[in-house]
Image: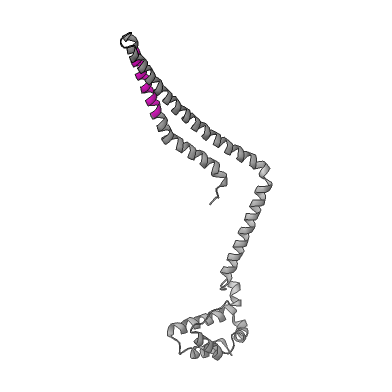
Amino acid sequence: MTKDEYLSILRKELQALPHDEQTEAMNYYRNYFEDAGDENTASVIEELGAPEKLGAYIRSNFACVPGKSPYAKEKGEGAGDSGKKRAIADKTNGINMLLLILLLTFTFPIWGPIVLGLLAAAFGIIAAIIAVMFAGVIAAAALFLAGIIVIVVGVSFLFSTPLITVLGLGAGLFLLGFALLCGILFIWVSTKILPPVIRGIVKVCSLPFRRKN
């Protein structure tokens, strides 16, 4: 039996199916023969069985139920090729990850101190900046308190020594104004300057750990 004879009988067996199902089934098995090649026609017929039995099977399932053609491997058209490729890719990724972990483990004495030193320096800079800001706030508060004390002391000499009162009021107001200015400056620095600096340090420290696209 030739390929055309087999397909002709199969088409007659599928006449009870809708036209779309017939076309799908015939296209599939025609491609099946073409993938195998003319030299393997007899093997394909033996593999598929009699066209009457194949037609009955297709009608009972109302679909051609395509399987993986062993002859499509040469062209990369097997239905399971994508699954095999995915499995190979997953296995390769797992091996690469294991090798990376082993590499990082064995080379830790080289890069470990450098990374830890960078992290320590970054945290030290951040801590120093925060400490300076905190000290600035305390200094501003101290100046503000000192200004109030100088004003109070100056007022106490209002009747005995008016000149001291005037000087005390001037010095106290100066201290209060300077304290407020320092407080505003520290608040501005802490809200506008400090966050970008911290983000920049964190970004620089995280560069070695980022994956390259």
- Residue 4: x and y, percent? 54, 87
Would you say residue 152 sits in the magenta stretch?
no
Q: Main secondary structure of the magenta part?
A: helix
* Quadrant in the rendering for residue 191: top left
| Image vertical order of residue 159 relative to residue 105, above or below | above
Using the image, determine if residue 186 lies above or below residue 15. above
Could you tell me which residue is drawn at 62 percent across and 86 percent down? 46
Q: Left or right? Give the position of 16 relative to 42.
A: left
Q: Quadrant of residue 113?
A: top right
Q: Residue at x 57, y 68 (%)?
A: 83
- Name the residue located 41 percent from the left edge and 20 percent from the top edge: 146
Please provide the residue range marked out in magenta: 167-183
Task: Examine the rendered structure and indicate whether residue 111 appears above or below residue 164.
Answer: below
Q: Please state, as top left, top right, bottom left or bottom right, where the N terminus lies in the image.
A: bottom right
Relative to 90, is 116 above or below? above
Q: Position of residue 134 (x, y in %)?
A: 47, 30
Out of 43 and 68, give the one closest to the viewer. 68
Horizontal side of residue 133 vs 70, given as left or right: left
Left-right relation of 125 to 98? left
Q: Position of residue 128 (x, y in %)?
A: 52, 31
Q: Nearer the viewer, residue 147 or 202?
A: 147
Q: How many marks?
A: 0
Q: Is 180 colored magenta in this rendering?
A: yes
Q: Is residue 169 left or right of residue 89?
A: left
Instruction: From the top left corner, tell me how far across and down residue 72 is, in percent.
Output: 58, 75
